[in-house]
């Protein structure tokens, strides 16, 4: 079976609310989302309507990468093919939206309540290569 | 709405049934519940069937083909872990509304061995976010929910572990539980970590199972049983908007809302409960629900488990059945099974785990995504 030559591999975000600049990693990935013009609720990515008030008008927001750890779990057992242990956290961005993400820079073997409120910063990381050879980029957070 | 009673209830021991299919399991439970009620399939006017993993496969109708295809309405229900309890509520509503006099709710599931860690097929695995964008699988989600309680109130891993100790103590006396084995505190804390702070014994096992109940209008129920169990409230909520919720499941708000509504409908308060069967899919979850169900004040759940108040014989026994931590959690069966458990206690038929003189019981289930059911039953 022969195949037409495909386009050159791209850098693709693992989720649609991550933007990956063409010159990544020189320029880092970032998160974007929507702010409801009626009630101000913020969401990751694009919205059909507001989950808080039901309005349908939004401003697009580019979120900064700074935030802090709200809560976490250390996952030791997961589905086949997933590397463990890792710290799966909920990060509160200082822009007022929360992200489900891996946190790096802490020892997963020593979970501690000292981690609450730790300042973190987002970075993009290549985590896989897809069927078409594209680099798949995830958003992770490193303790600062 | 008119009064509705449970007149028949039964379940299979939860566990592994590799040689049977889900229709056989559900059919056995349905026949046992009808036998308990003193009815046959010809008396059943509507059937609701809760099943999650085969929700596109007309499980309810296939059960009827197995036990008596009478042509009555059959509704297949799916609502994550609250699938069975939502099926129960649909059956209750059918009778309470006056539309039908006799209804049967069946919950069934065959989990196989993948359980809650089973990964979805299809698609490009390169785009799977699990483990690279945090965690959305249940062990991690309920780990985080427990950690949030640690952050707010200083709760410790040992306090969560005591939930597993208590429920496994109860489970020893439940012949319908998948596991009947005590796990002392040291053993729970030293077991391998699944998703911190939950260790292996703080996670419910997965297994197969089925349960069924027959419901009737008050007038009809009195012709069939001397021990009707009345449905004092049957409430279903979904999770309202909270700022983190699109990212972090909120298992608390919708449970609090459901509890408030259920107590109001039943005309009782949490202090009137004889016992509670609540959704301890993970040890962390049970502790949170003590507060959500108002069994204690905000931030006092750690103290409640420390004092032993939720043991059989304590102020408010929780999960006398051994909970999901002992029983296992066949998703579609779970919600019907905890109604069966409360029914048995209210009829003084719960054997060695009987909560003495139980008069009012609350059955709670939460399915992530989320759906919460609370059913308050009384003798």
Image: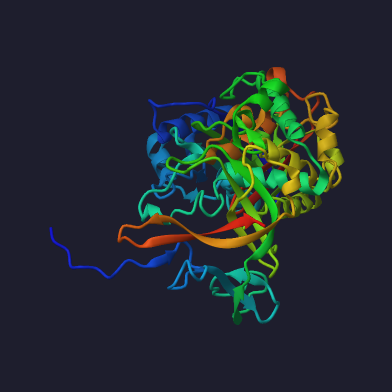
Q: Residue at x 69, y 64 (%)?
A: B243
Q: How is the image coloured?
A: rainbow
Kindly tell me whether residue B340 is visible in this rendering.
no
Query: Is B327 left, or right, of B68 in this rendering?
Result: right
Query: Is A96 left, or right, of B269 in this rendering?
Result: left
Q: Nearer the viewer, residue B315 or A112?
A: A112
- Horizontal and vertical percent position of residue B139: 59, 41
Q: Nearer the viewer, residue B157 or B26?
A: B157
Above/below status of B57 relative to A13 = above
Above/below status of B334 relative to A70 = above
Above/below status of B378 relative to B120 = above
Choose top left, top right, bottom left or bottom right for residue A6. Answer: bottom left
Query: Is A7 left, or right, of B79 in this rendering?
Result: left
The outermost residue toward the front is A26
Choose top left, top right, bottom left or bottom right for residue A80. Answer: top left
Kindly tell me whether residue A39 is visible in this rendering.
yes
Identify the image quadrant of the N terminus of chain B.
Answer: bottom right
Q: Residue at x 40, y 27 (%)?
A: B18
Above/below status of A119 relative to A74 = below
- Horizontal and vertical percent position of residue B24: 41, 31
Identify the image quadrant of the C terminus of chain B.
Answer: top right
- Horizontal and vertical percent position of residue A5: 20, 68
């Amino acid at each position: 079976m022969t195949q037409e030559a495909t386009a050159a591999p791209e850098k693709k975000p693992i989720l649609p609310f991550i933007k990956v600049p063409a010159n990544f990693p020189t320029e880092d990935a970032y998160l974007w989302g929507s702010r409801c013009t009626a009630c101000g609720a913020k969401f990751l990515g694009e919205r059909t309507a507001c989950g808080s008030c039901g309005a349908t008008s939004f401003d697009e927001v580019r979120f900064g990468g700074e935030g802090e750890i709200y809560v976490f779990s250390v996952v030791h057992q997961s589905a086949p093919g997933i590397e463990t242990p890792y710290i799966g956290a909920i990060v509160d961005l200082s822009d007022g939206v929360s992200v489900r993400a891996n946190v790096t820079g802490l020892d997963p073997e020593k979970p501690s309540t000292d981690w609450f409120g730790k300042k973190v910063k987002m970075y993009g990381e290549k985590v896989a290569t897809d069927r078409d050879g594209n680099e798949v980029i995830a958003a992770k957070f490193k303790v600062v | 709405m008119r009064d509705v009673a449970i007149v028949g209830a039964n379940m299979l021991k939860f566990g592994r049934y590799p040689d049977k299919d889900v229709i056989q399991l559900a059919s056995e439970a349905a026949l046992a519940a009808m036998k308990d009620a003193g009815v046959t399939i010809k008396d059943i006017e509507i059937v609701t069937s809760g099943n999650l993993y085969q929700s596109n496969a007309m499980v309810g109708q296939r059960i009827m083909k197995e036990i008596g295809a009478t042509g009555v309405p059959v509704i297949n229900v799916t609502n994550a872990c609250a699938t069975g309890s939502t099926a129960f509520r649909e059956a209750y509503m059918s009778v309470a509304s006056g539309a039908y006099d006799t209804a049967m709710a069946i919950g069934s599931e065959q989990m196989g061995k993948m359980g809650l860690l089973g990964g979805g097929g299809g698609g490009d695995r390169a785009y799977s976010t699990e483990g690279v964008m945090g965690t959305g699988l249940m062990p991690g989600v309920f780990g985080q929910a427990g950690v949030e309680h640690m952050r707010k109130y200083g709760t410790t891993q040992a306090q969560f572990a005591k939930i597993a100790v208590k429920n496994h103590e109860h489970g020893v006396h439940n012949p319908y539980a998948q596991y009947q084995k005590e796990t002392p505190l040291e053993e729970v804390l030293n077991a391998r970590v699944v998703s911190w702070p939950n260790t292996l014994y703080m996670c419910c096992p997965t297994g197969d199972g089925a349960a069924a109940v027959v419901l009737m209008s008050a007038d009809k129920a009195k012709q069939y049983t001397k021990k009707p169990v009345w449905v004092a409230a049957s409430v279903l909520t979904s999770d309202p908007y909270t700022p983190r919720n699109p990212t972090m499941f909120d298992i608390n708000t919708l449970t609090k809302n459901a509890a408030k509504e259920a107590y109001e409908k039943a005309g009782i308060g949490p202090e009137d409960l004889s016992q509670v069967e609540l959704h301890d899919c993970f040890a962390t979850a049970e502790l949170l629900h003590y507060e959500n169900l108002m069994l204690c004040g905000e931030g006092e759940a750690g103290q409640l488990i420390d004092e032993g108040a939720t043991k059989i014989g304590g102020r408010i026994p929780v999960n006398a059945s051994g909970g999901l931590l002992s029983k296992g959690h066949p998703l579609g069966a779970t919600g019907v099974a905890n109604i069966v458990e409360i029914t048995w206690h209210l009829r003084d038929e719960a054997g060695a785990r009987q909560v003495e003189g139980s008069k009012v019981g609350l059955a709670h289930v939460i399915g992530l995504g989320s759906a919460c059911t609370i059913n308050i039953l009384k003798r």
